[in-house]
Amino acid sequence: MRVTSNAQSQLAILNIQNTFAKMSKLQNQISTGNDVNSVSDNPLNALQIIQNNAAGAQLTTNLSSIQSASNVLQSSSDALTQIQNILATIKNSALTANNPNQTVSNTALAAQVNSAINQIVGVANTQLSDGTYLFSGTASKTPPYATTASSTSGQVSAITYQGSQQTGQMIVGKSLSVNTLLVGSSIFQPVIGGATVYSGSTGAQAGAGTDTPTGHGALLVQHTLTSFSGSSGIAAGTSSDASDTILGPLGANKLVINDTSGTGASGTVSLNGGTPVAFTNSDGNLKVTGPAGEVVYLDTTAISAGFKGSVDLTADGTMSVDGGTSTTPIDFSTNQAVTDFSNGATTYVNSSNIRQAGTAQVTYPGKTDLFQTLMNLRDTIANTQGQSSSDRSAALNQQIAELDRFSNSIAVPLSNQATQSQFLTNLQTRTTTLQLNLKKATSDLQSTDMAASIVALQQEQVLYQAGMQMTATISQLSLVNFIK
């Protein structure tokens, strides 16, 4: 079967075209440096390259998220550290205020605490450059704390949390997330357990019932009436009802009277074993102080002649948890209910050991508020409630202890932030390594082997030139060439 000249020409042209196509592909690979410039170049490698590129883009996104999360964690850690430092400064002011030999005025110390309150509120309301609040949880665009100023003093009188109760998270990888936007109430109003705590010298203690208030409060204990047993002739002084500080059932407080004149004209009287005080039958309002600072005012104008002995006292009073708006008579039992008239909240008080009038600072189980503690401390330092020196000192001691507890509680989220920061650092290292390995694998699939491609190009060029020459020879219609 004879091969026609046309068939030879078509076959030669096809070979030349194939060779030229291979040359073009090799030239493109050499010029671009890419072995795969289209899916048809190498379908399997092209598919793997597409998958690698998608994975690489996701890793780039993850690295950006990791960096953003790290920045947020660092900002919140800086804020919490700053608050701890402010609390340390406030504690120093409180210790100074509780020092009887202090040289700084209480007014100045209270002003320092008030300034620190504003500073802490400002730090708690820290906002990032994109408008995100650090301590509002998922309500990241809402300021976590709002303040209310007193209409009289102009100082902050109430601080309210208005953020979310759910922690904000950031996704930093497949099935990986970190807590970044914290819930302010869990940091500055931590939940505590245990019985209600009373400070001061009143003798009030926690009762057996379940208190409904939370946070902080004050139990106002007031004297109402002092009465005397026996026939000693002693009576209440003119200031007794308003100024006596003794409290207790019959026999809880005791007077010892010694009529040294034998006629009731003069002698000594002591309260609860305290220092004897001289009296005369002209004293209608004699102040007698007991060993714990308790006070009773006496009328000694009618002391029975020659009386020498002890007199049991009954000192009645009331309790209030709403500043005196409503009062509950003290019955000196182990479990008395005292109700706040303003909101109906009930506090159960063990009044059996109440022996002095005064104000007891109360810390309820549940949520205790750092800001309320600071405002109470400010007011205690300034002594706005007119507490006795012993009650004020006891309140300061309790508030100092609470400052320590809050500082320690802030250390918990700080530690958590440090742990998460370390996790992000390790994750960033692993992600960067994975990204580099992926880039290398993609490069191995895509990059041109220059030496092999150049050699192959040269071979194709030789074949191309040979093909052209052979085609030219076949095309010459000469009998001699045909015979050849």
Image: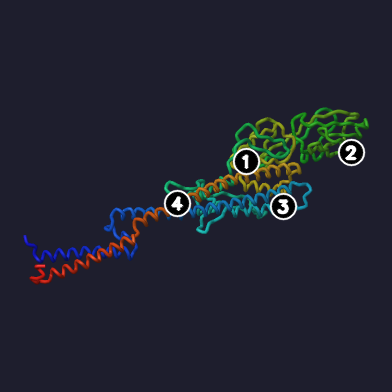
Q: Residues within 10 Å of mark 4 (few under 14, many from 20)?
A: some
**Amino acid beneath label 3:** Leu
Q: Is residue 23 visible?
A: yes
SS type, badge 3 = helix
Q: Nearer the viewer, residue 72 or 363?
A: 72
Q: Residues within 10 Å of mark 2 (few under 14, many from 20)?
A: few
Give residue 175's position: percent from left, percent from top.
43, 46
Q: Nearer the viewer, residue 6 or 34?
A: 6
Secondary element at tag 1: loop
Q: Amino acid at mark 2?
A: Ser
Left or right, residue 256 beside residue 81 = right
Q: Which residue is mark 2?
A: 282
Picture quadrant of residue 40:
bottom left
Q: CA distance from mark 1 to mark 4?
A: 61 Å
Q: Is residue 344 found left or right of 227 in the rendered image?
A: left
216 to the left or right of 180: right
Q: CA distance from mark 1 to mark 3?
A: 33 Å
Observer-side mark, 2 or 4, equals 4
Where's residue 444, x and y in %? 36, 56
Which residue corresponds to mark 1? 341
| Earlier-in-chain disc, 3 versus 2 | 3
Circle 4 residue:
431
Query: 276 or 261: nearer the eye?
Result: 276
Residue contact between numbered discs 1 and 4, judged by CB atoms under 8 Å: no
Structural distance between the alpha carbons of marks 2 and 4: 93 Å
Category of crowding for the residue at label 1, using alpha-carbon neighbours closer than 10 angstroms: few (below 14), some (14–19), many (at least 20): some
- Disc 3 marks which residue? 109
Please report whichever mark, 1 or 4, sits nearer to the chain's N-terminal start.
Answer: 1
Quadrant including the C terminus: bottom left
Residue 146 seen in render: no
